Image (spheres, rainbow, N blue to C red):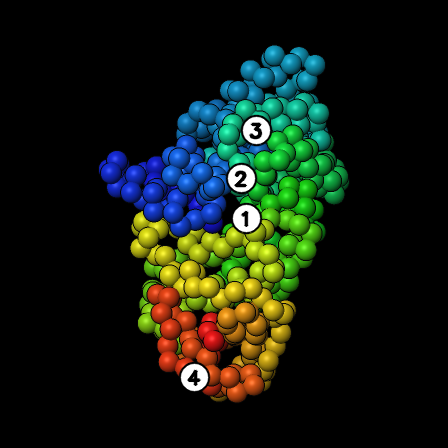
Amino acid sequence: MVTDFRTQYVSNAAQRNAERAWTAAHFDFVMGGDLQQYKSLNPAIRDIPYALDWNVMQPGEQKSGGLATSYYDDMQQWFAAHPQYPLEKAFIHLAGSDPTPASRLQFTAWGSKRWAINPGDPGARAYVQDRIRRFVGNADGVFFDSHSSGDIGKALGKAPLAEYPDRQVYQKDMVEYVHEIAQAIAPKIVMLNTSEYMKPFDWNMATAAGAVHLERMNNPLTELMTERWRWVDTLLTHNVLVELVSLDSWADANNVHGVFGTYTPGNYGSKAERLKMFELASYYLVVPSSPDRLFLDLENAWKVPYDQVWLKAQEYDVGHPTGPRHVIQSGRDSTNTGFSIWAREFDHALILARPTSTWKNRIFGDSTAVLVPLPNGESLRPLHGDGTLGVPVTSVRLRQSEAMIMVR
């Protein structure tokens, strides 16, 4: 899967068309982009547009008109045409004052002032369902951004709310609100961006929607990777469609500053190749026997054409998993950092990954390497990012935050 916030800004028409043709030929699912062109290039591709739902930009803050994000004018017109629903009840207000536009809960996100919608109001629910039905059209669903417990919690703040003195009631209403939107546009999908958050509120919203965009979740440098794998497992077990999204781009990984200052190419030709091969291995460690509800997004950035950052190794046929992931080796490296080597068998390959074990040690270089004999004395060939295979080996050296895909 890919997020196409790029091609609409490519001014040269020939280049724009060429990029979209390449994207349509290499991805199964797109968020954003030109729906009609993608469908014409690849009738099997799925495409969902970007939108907001639980907040509305205030007048003067709207960057453009339309039903996706700047819909306050449409909202006013809809409520005027449905007088059984008072407009003011569709918003959350600060406690201790009459419910008026002046007392609406407002917050700032991405540089724009917004009002928070009241998810428990029947009018707000009826309006959003109608708006999203009109907005989706012949797309395959809708993507709702900033839908994590963190995003919503920050927006609501700590001030007393007139409609929700109990925040747990708000969460309950929000889950029902999401579920009703999903029902209203079914069988099209509702995908929420719950990002890295894994709280009960995120779980309830994810299962109510049926699909999640896990922005920043596939991050080899976090000590939470094993916990995140379990989170993906649980979502998939409950039939949620999951998009597993990376944090860092190729350019980020090749940087010599910050967290990548101690990061080395390791077993690969570049630091970026090493990072992206871990992200691919991470996907293989959680993918079910049938992969159609798990989508991999390796490049959540849009500065360069997608063909320039395509990991050819994605195309290599590793077959299907023949068992669950498991730890095959553990110990401490030369920096006295504990480690565990995770493995998973596939028809044609063995997946190996050494996730970061602690936030205290941000060293990822060659000094952290440990020798990992391959199980049962097998002689396997390492898969490179460009899709080629190395010479057969019976052991590998894995650094902290490094993974390898070993092909039979």
- The structure residue drawn at horizontal position 56% and vertical position 21%, both measured from the top left corner, is 75
The amino acid marked with disc number 2 is Phe
Q: 10 Å neighbourhood of mark 1: few (<14), some, or many (≥20)?
A: many
Q: Earlier in the sequence, mark 1 or mark 3?
A: 3
Instruction: Report the disc number at residue 132.
Output: 3
Q: Is mark 2 on a helix, strand or loop?
A: strand
Q: Earlier in the sequence, mark 3 or mark 4?
A: 3
The amino acid marked with disc number 4 is Val
Q: CB atoms at circles 2 and 3 under 8 Å apart? A: no
CA separation in Å, label 3 and label 4: 54 Å
Q: CB atoms at circles 4 and 1 under 8 Å apart? A: no
Q: Which of marks 2 and 4 is nearer the N terminus?
A: 2
- The structure residue drawn at horizontal position 63% and vertical position 34%, both measured from the top left corner, is 186
Disc 1 designates what residue? Answer: 213
Tag in front: 4 or 1: 4
Q: Could you say which quadrant of the image residue 107 lies in?
A: top right
Q: What element carries label 3?
A: helix
Disc 4 designates what residue? Answer: 393
Q: Please, is residue 18 above or below residue 235 in the view?
A: above
The amino acid marked with disc number 3 is Ile
Q: Could you say which quadrant of the image residue 159 lies in?
A: top right
- On screen, residue 188 versus residue 21, left or right, reads right
CA separation in Å, label 2 and label 4: 44 Å
Q: Please, is residue 257 above or below residue 60 in the view?
A: below
Instruction: Report the disc number at residue 143.
Output: 2
Q: 10 Å neighbourhood of mark 3: few (<14), some, or many (≥20)?
A: many
Q: Which of marks 2 and 3 is nearer the N terminus?
A: 3
Q: Nearer the viewer, residue 216 or 285?
A: 285
